[in-house]
Amino acid sequence: MIWLEALLMGIGLAMDALAVAVALGVSMRCAFHWKLILGTAAFFGWFQFMMPVIGWLGGSRVHLLTGMPGRITAAGILLLLGGKMIVDSWRGGNKEAPVFSWGRVILLAFSTSIDALIVGISYACMERSSIWLEAVVIGVVTLMISAAGGVIGRRFGCLLGPRSGCIGGSALTLIAIKTLIVG
């Protein structure tokens, strides 16, 4: 039963990472090769693994990153990066795909894993003795789902061409709005 719970939790938590990976793939187009796709998926998986552990270990002491301050921080990061992707796609015209940035990926991985931190805090409140199994499953599921999202996004980006960054940026902007409204 614990495996099923962890799997379903991992799928639920991976949805924002999936959407962001698709957006990155769409905006980077054919330049989003396997090394970048797998590296991006690894960062998303790592953050989704670590954040529940941090939440569980920190319990209620990590309240500054949860609730409204965490949602505003995550939404702000997503809005800034999404807006930059939109602006770059319109400025770029027919130029090549935007330059990839690992720093940007780390910010995106952090901002999409705030909800995983809250899951860890809730496990601490339930006085779970360990969440290592759940954290590993959540991380692996996120890695696999976001890698698939990167591949799907890359395919669509290659088909849509240079202005596809606008689609990716719009997706990040919508995720930011959802983060502010629902959490």
Image (cartoon, rainbow, N blue to C red):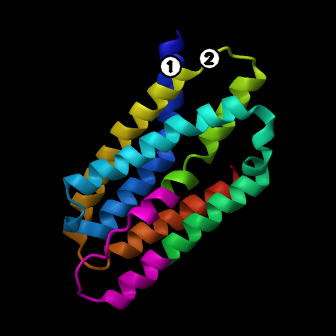
Instruction: For label 1, count other residues whose C-alpha is less than 10 Å away and answer few (under 14), some (14-19) or many (20+).
Output: few
Q: Which residues are magenta?
A: 84-107
Disc 2 target residue: 130
Residues at discs 1 and 2 in contact (Cβ within 8 Å): yes
Can you name the residue that lies furthest to the top here? Answer: 1
What amino acid type should be assigned to the residue bearing mark 1? Leu
Q: Position of residue 18 (x, y in %)?
A: 42, 48
Disc 1 target residue: 133
Closer-to-camera residue (170/58): 58
The quarter holding residue 57 reads top right
Q: Position of residue 106 (x, y in %)?
A: 47, 57
Residue 85 among those drawn in magenta: yes
Is 42 on the left or on the right of 178, as rendered? Answer: left
For image coordinates 72% across by 34% down, the residue present is 58
For image coordinates 64% across by 39% down, the residue present is 117
What amino acid type should be assigned to the residue bearing mark 2? Ser
Is 172 on the left or on the right of 151, as rendered? Answer: right
